[in-house]
Image (tube, helix red, strand yellow):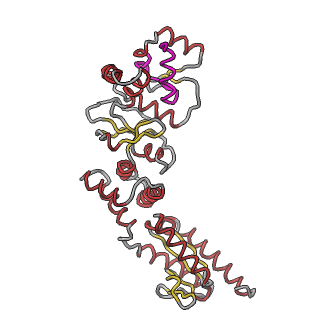
Amino acid sequence: MLPLAVAAAVAERQHLIIAPWQLRLAGASEWAVATRIRAQGWRRCDRGTIWLPGPDEPVRRLAASLLAYARPVEAESRFRRLSARHDAVSALVGAALQAGQVACGPSAAWLHGLAGPPPVDWLRVPGHSGHLRRADVCLRYGSVPLAHVRWLRGLPVCDVERTLMDMAWALRKQRRRHVELARMIGTADALRLTTLDTLEARMDAAGAFHGATLLARVVTDLRGGLSHSRTEGRARGIVGEVLSLHGLALHPRPYTVSLAGRPAGEADLAVVELRYDIEIDGPHHLLPAQQRADQRRDRLMQRAGWQVDRYPVGQVDDAPHAFAREVDGTVRALLARRQSGLF
C-alpha cells in the first residue's frame, strides 16, 4: 500500500484520527500531509492529532485523547515489534492504542452503556507515564491488566468492574452518588455485564482503593442488607400530613393484602380506606430479579383492587415536596372516584 493509503486505513480504524508519528512511520512526507491539510480538509487538533473530515462526536474526541497519551517516544519500538506479526495498518493502530492507556471512569461507563458521554475524557495511564495534563482530560494513574481491558467501538476500555470501582471515586462530590452508583450497577446487571458476586470478588482482590467504602455500602444495599427505614419513616410522615388534609390516616404498620384467601403482598404505606399502596424502594429494587418480583407482586395487588405507586428513596430524600404533591394528586383522584361510585 502507498503511504497515504496506509495512513487513511489507520485513521479509519481510529475514528478518522491519526497521530503525526503514525503518519511518519507510515512513510507519509510532511509535504503530502500539508497538502491534505490545505486541500482536503485535514486539520490539526490541540491534542496533537490530525483529524480527517468527519463528524465531531464524543467518541472521536475520546479517540483523540487516547492517541495523545500513546507515549510516542516509545511508539517506534512498539511498531517494529508488532510489525513482525501484523500488517502495517494493524501494527500502527496497535502501537497507538496498546500503549497502556485505557478509557476509565465516566468515559468507560458511557461506552459500557451505563451513562451518557461525560464533558471531559477520563483515561487511566501507566503510573510511570508522567504525561502533560490537559484541561479536557482527567487522568488516573496505574496500569490495567490486559485481562481487565475490553475493546469497545475500537477503543481500549476498562472492564465494567474496574469502571464501577473508578466511578465510586468519580462520583464522590455528587449529592446523589449512592443512588447513581446503585443505578449503574443495576444497569450493568440488567445488561449482563457483571453480577454482584463478580463485582465483590474484584473489590476484594483490589484491596484498598478510592471509593471502596462507598461502593461496598452500595453493593450491600443492593443485596437488601441495609435498611432504608429512615427514608421510609420520613415518607410516612410526609404522607401522613397529606392524608390529614383529607381526613384520612395511614395504617400504623405494613398492611397485608389478601387475594382469594392468600397474601397478595404487604403494603409499605397503606391507605386502607382508598386501597392505596405507597412503596418506598431502596436501591435493590433496581436489580432485574427484584424488578420482576415487584411486577408479579404489583399485579396481584391490582387484582385485589389496590393501586400501587412506587417511589425510589432518592425522590423522597431529594424532592420531598414533589413527592408530597404526587401523593396528594393520587389521593384526590381516588377520593373523586369513591364519591362518583366508581371505587
Is residue 197 visible from the viewing direction of this image?
yes
Magenta includes 17?
yes
Q: Is residue 54 left or right of residue 229?
A: right
Quadrant in which the C terminus appears: bottom right
Give the number of marks: 0
Picture layout, residue 290 above or below residue 8: below
* Front position in the image: 239 or 35: 35
x 41%, y 72%: residue: 228
Q: Where is residue 137 drawn, in percent x and y?
A: 41, 36
Q: Is residue 115 left or right of residue 326?
A: left
* Front position in the image: 172 or 270: 270
Picture layout, residue 240 above or below residue 207: below
Q: Is residue 166 left or right of residue 251?
A: left
Q: Which residues are magenta?
A: 1-23
x 29%, y 38%: residue: 143
Q: Is residue 183 left or right of residue 298?
A: left
Q: Where is residue 73 drawn, in percent x and y?
A: 31, 21
x 49%, y 8%: residue: 31
x 54%, y 91%: residue: 261
- Main SS, magenta region, reads helix
Picture layout, residue 60 above or below residue 221: above
* Front position in the image: 211 or 67: 67
Q: Where is residue 292 drawn, in percent x and y?
A: 51, 69
Is residue 175 visible from the viewing direction of this image?
no
